[in-house]
């Protein structure tokens, strides 16, 4: 549970130590030792243990749904069987799939999802779930390829980069500006 101060609380005006009490902890704002915003607030649990806050930390438990992750994993597992009958590794897709392949597949599955949504007579939970999982897969794969480009000190494989961006790639520290990346694609 996150401890929060009232929205009108101003640490520059208020006294040097303020408290908010919740069921599991008391938060203290210490103006005397601020290094960063997060270090100003400490949690003290009923047990006596102390921790900094989680105000600026990623909250995977809150951001993600176990129901969705489980259903998505079931979808991925179902589609591991290749046309030749062999079972591909679960992380096979991370070896790299061209962005254009992800985009074409994303559109096909989005159109399925949209048509199920638009025509209530067509809505069958299992088909709708399959379409949604396929959308998630293609969007995740596309994002994965973009993040590989951003985090790689080497030039990525040309087939994963849109043709009009291949000459703009560089070797060295990653530079990523989403506005530049999409400038030629959004008209």
Image (cartoon, rainbow, N blue to C red):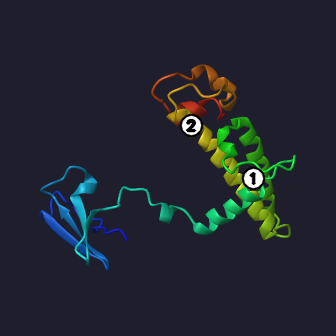
Q: Secondary structure at mark 2?
A: helix
Disc 1: CA contacts within 10 A as few (<14), some (14-19) or many (>=20): some
Relative image position of residue 97 (x, y in whole percent): 70, 38
Q: Position of residue 146 (x, y in %)?
A: 59, 37
Q: Is residue 146 left or right of residue 106?
A: left
Q: Residue furthest bottom?
A: 23
Q: Secondary structure beneath disc 1?
A: helix
Q: Is residue 150 visible?
A: yes
Other-residue count near label 2 (Cα within 10 Å), few / some / many at <14 / 14–19 / ≥20: some
Q: Which residue is mark 1?
A: 110
Q: x, y (%) of residue 89?
A: 71, 48
Looking at the rendered image, the disc whose residue lies closer to the viewer, 2 or 1, is: 2
**Quarter assignment of residue 113:** bottom right
| Residue 65 picture quarter | bottom right
Residue at the (76%, 60%) spot, across then down: 130
Quarter of the picture containing the N terminus is: bottom left
Task: Depth check: give the residue in front, 168 or 45.
Answer: 45
Which residue corresponds to the image point at 15% horizontal and 58% vertical from the top-left? 31
Q: What's the residue at 54%, 26% (across, down)?
A: 154
Query: For this rendering, which residue is in front, 120 or 174?
Result: 174
Instruction: Say which residue appears at 30% left-offset and 65% top-offset.
Output: 7
| Vertical side of 90 occupied by 63: above or below | below
Residue 13 position, x and y percent, is 15, 60
Q: Which mark is residue 132?
A: none
Question: Where does label 2 land, which residue?
Answer: 148
Of mark 2 and mark 1, the one earlier in the sequence is 1
Report the Cα–Cα distance between label 2 and label 1.
Answer: 24 Å
């Amino acid at each position: 549970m996150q401890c929060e101060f009232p929205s009108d609380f101003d640490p520059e005006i208020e006294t040097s130590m303020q408290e908010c009490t919740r069921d599991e902890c008391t938060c203290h704002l210490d103006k005397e030792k601020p290094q960063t915003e997060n270090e100003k607030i400490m949690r003290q649990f009923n047990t006596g243990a102390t921790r900094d806050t989680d105000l600026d930390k990623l909250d995977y438990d809150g951001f993600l749904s176990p129901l969705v992750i489980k259903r998505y994993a079931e979808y991925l597992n179902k589609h591991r069987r290749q046309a030749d009958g062999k079972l591909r590794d679960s992380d096979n897709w991370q070896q790299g799939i061209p962005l254009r392949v992800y985009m074409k597949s994303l559109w096909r599955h989005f159109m399925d999802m949209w048509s199920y949504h638009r025509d209530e007579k067509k809505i069958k939970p299992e088909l709708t779930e399959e379409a949604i999982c396929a959308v998630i897969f293609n969007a995740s794969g596309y994002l994965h390829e973009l993040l590989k480009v951003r985090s790689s000190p080497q030039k990525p494989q040309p087939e994963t980069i849109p043709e009009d961006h291949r000459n703009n790639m560089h070797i060295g520290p990653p530079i990523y500006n989403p506005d530049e990346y999409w400038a030629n694609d959004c008209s």
